[in-house]
Image: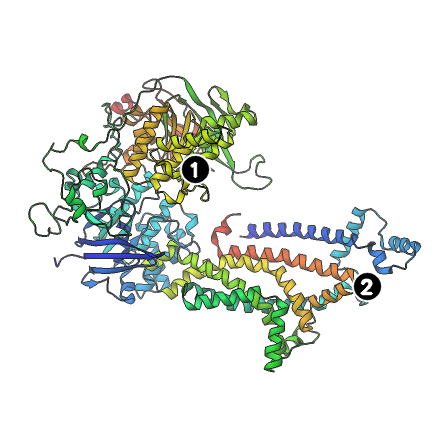
Amino acid sequence: MIHFLAKRIAQALVVLLLVSVIVFVLLHLLPGGPARAILGVQATPEAIAHFNHQQGYDRSLPEQYAMYLGRLLSGDLGESYKLNQSVASLLGERLPKTALLAGLALALAALLAVPLGILQALRRGKAADYVLTGAAFLAYATPVFFLGLVLILVFSQQLPLLPAEAPQADTVGGLLADLPALVLPVVTTALGIVAAFSRYMRSAVLDNLGEEYVRTARAKGQSEARIMARHVLRNALIPLATLLGLYLPTLFSGTLVVESMFNYPGMGLLFWNAAQGSDFPVLLGVTLVVGVATVLGSLITDIAYAVLDPRIRSVT
Amino acid sequence: MTDSLLRIDDLHVEIAGRGRTVHALDGIDLDLAPGEALGIVGESGCGKTMTALSVLGLLPHGGKVTGGRILFDGTDLAAAPEPVLRNVRGNTVGMVFQDPLTSLNPTLTIGAQVAEPLLLHTRLTRAEAWAKAEETLRLVGMPRPAERLRNYPHQLSGGMRQRVAIAMALICEPRLLIADEPTTALDVTTQHQILELIDELRARLGMAMILVTHDLGVIARRVDRVAVMYGGRIAERAAVRPLFATPRHRYTQALFAALPELPRPPLGGSAPVTGADRPLATIPGLPPSLVTRPTGCRFAPRCGFATDICHAAEPELTDGLDDTPPAAGAHAFACFHPTDPAPGAEPAAEILPPAPARLPVRTDEPLLRLADVSKTYPLHGGPFARRKGAAEVSAVAGISLTVRRGETFGIVGESGCGKSTLGRMAVGLEAPTGGSVHFGGRDLATLTKRELRAHRRDVQLMFQDSYAAMDPRMRVGAVLREPLVIQGIGDRAERRRRIDGLLDDVGLPRGAVDRYPHEFSGGQRQRLGLARALALTPSLVVADEPVSALDVSVQAQILNLMRELQREKGLSYLVISHDLAVVRHLADSVGVMYLGKLVETGPAEQVFARPLHPYTRGLLDTVNAPDPDAAQAGSPLGGETPSAADPPSGCRFRTRCPAATGLCATTEPPPAEPETPGHRVACHFPLTAGAVSTG
């Protein structure tokens, strides 16, 4: 198990290095280069040359990459062009908030999807299965922004139960203090995931119910409820674990829309605003974070896999 | 009958699915006394497994008992509510299933799974249940049971997993054990160990048993009585000896005649073995589908003795003496034209179809020659897998053999011995990591890509599972045309002609070209597999377990067909099988493989009659002959095959060999021909005539 983890973490580090290379390359693909982006279209060639020399942009690419990587490791992601703040401190403020939104949404999704999937599998071909399947496809097919608008319209305009704007606190604790305001952003983010996860759960449970080990458990005299809880559930969660990790990047694109819609002060909103104002260091900083999240997601998947499935553990 | 433990009366089971209903069981009557062992035999789809499953109410999705009673210890299980059934399952009736890998939960420890029935049916604490689980694992012959409790199923071998499954079924000390094909998924030697274990436990615990199997050999010496099933009904039921000695139902008779038999080598003697040259009796056609209830005898459409009454009326079980229903213990059969039980009244020839006999090999011309061929695989993937000293699996190690033109060479061995790898190298699908493969005098390694493609015409593969080997979305015509197109043979009309010819050859209607593979039965698919292999008129067909997936009656059809085509087309076969009887039936020469090594090779009748290697001898001794009176000869093999990743030093068989000495551990035995030329053995202490008389 330790060997397996060490190997996977080493592999993840290699991928992270590649992510940094890609972001570095993107930095150099900026239209007109970073100098033109910062100094604007009016800048004289002298000013640009001076800027490039000052920033080290006139050195060879490998040298620049080494410098970039050095800065990266010391936490320096550059300065925002617009907000007069370092990218690192911006991300430090915003990332926990997005993580909160994504985490709550993911937890809610898993909490709903697992029982829903089991229910559908048990009621296969009956009314409940068809209704839930229809609802899942509807939720899956509805764009997040439309879903958010509908939810705002219903729960904050028609029935004034919940606020239409996310909490505006500076800290995670402050966000949590205003729970009602969190409900709509979290639910909007979660619904699509519930739809997808419950479909997977349904088919995983169905697959496992058809397995011979379930028949063995029945032949022992085990009840259907205990067969589900003790035998099927763990085996059915294995494919869901894969999905969970792979969903992290998707989740980010979901929060991007949700955050700008509900004015939630997270990384997605930061990215949105930075994109509007061509704030390239911020955009690249966020890109880096998403890259890291993706790698971490697949690492978490592998670990969850190993925990759930003893067969993976023994394959080093 | 008040003293019966289990009594099944007129049981009817239907399985609904996809808009049609299968009448799986149609009036089954069975009776089992306490401590008695009953065998249920039949081919796939005959209802034997459904009978076993219905006892515990474990019928598959859509299945239900539509009539009859299942009285177990006075309770009608067919009508019992779920809680009553649950209290019987795993408690007073234990069940063992066919595949020990899939019937264990991969994510729970052995201990948790073995202790589970105890926690359900007794008031034992978890710790007490685990202690009992350890004890039960010891009872079923599991080495180091305390350690195994914490293992997961994938960490055990197939035989050990089946021991776990048996421990699970026995932990509550049931009064009845139902074993559904408990050894079908296991190797010959493991099969024997498991059957012995079940026998021994049954005697020790005094429980009754229902042993469900397709294998007449398995049942012959393990049960008291046998029920033969066909088409959802009992065709014949009798004590085991009368049934094997004088089968009365025409189906039972045909089933025995279709069995390729393995003549037993007399101990130490050298009596000539014949009989393999006779064609096998086949049963034409297919079992009934059971979607519509057949009128008349279900076997009538395939029976050579059927008359009008057989098609019109359904025969009831009778003892042939009077019209009253037969007693539970009587020899009963449901046939209007039973065999005559008088000795010699039933000449075997009567039911033998005209089928070809084996022709002697005509030439000595070597077609395929393997010289010191080896194949190792890296144990782990990745970029460093091939580095020096990395862990390797030695699948095939230093094998030399020659297949002559027109000859059938049989390779026998248990799973993991490297026989399939050898087959793939013979075809050229895999390159050996050592040694050379010569075909028609040319070294395959020296062929260019273009030459290799041309070579593929000459050597074709036939698979165990022909269905899996065919694209399910291609029609049969396209499947058969593809090799012709790839090799650029003929124009459209010419290909069409050849495909028609191929279908004629393998006995399928020409209309088959427009159908898809899934529309055919197992035997027909195997015919298709053979047709595809023959499409390019090869000179060698490598057949990897060609009949392992088939029922006995269909197996005989395919074996006869293979031999017939060999005679017509002068084919050579390299037949790979775990089934000694099949190899014995087909092969002129055999090679016996163990853990990547060819331990013995020579003319088939010599190897089978006078095995020189202790492994060959052990394999032959282990086979279950379909004869209730056959004494277990010699010493069947114990132990398990070691891992090919870490084969034993010296002779690879020494860890299981009764005659092994220090020499065997240090020195690999060189091949020698101690008795007759051509009969080679790689053993320091071969079982030669001299060795037998002195040792």
Per the image, the residue denoted by label 1 is B477
Question: Which residue sits at x=89%, y=55%?
Answer: A48
Residue B490 falls left or right of residue B221: right
Q: Can residue B593 be seen in this view?
A: no
The local crowd at label 1, few if under 14, some if 14 to 19, many if 20 or more residues have their Cα within 10 Å, is many
Kind of element beneath mark 1: helix
Q: In this view, does A102 lie above or below B680?
A: below
Kind of element beneath mark 2: loop
At which x and y percent is residue B277?
A: 26, 26
At which x and y percent is residue B577?
A: 36, 34
Q: Can residue A184 be seen in this view?
A: yes
Question: Which residue sits at x=47%, y=24%?
Answer: B372
Q: In which quarter of the image is residue A207?
A: bottom left
Report the mark closest to the observer, 1 or 2.
1
Nearer-the-camera pick, B332 or B635: B332
Per the image, the residue denoted by label 2 is A81
Chain of the residue displaying label 2: A
The local crowd at label 2, few if under 14, some if 14 to 19, many if 20 or more residues have their Cα within 10 Å, is some
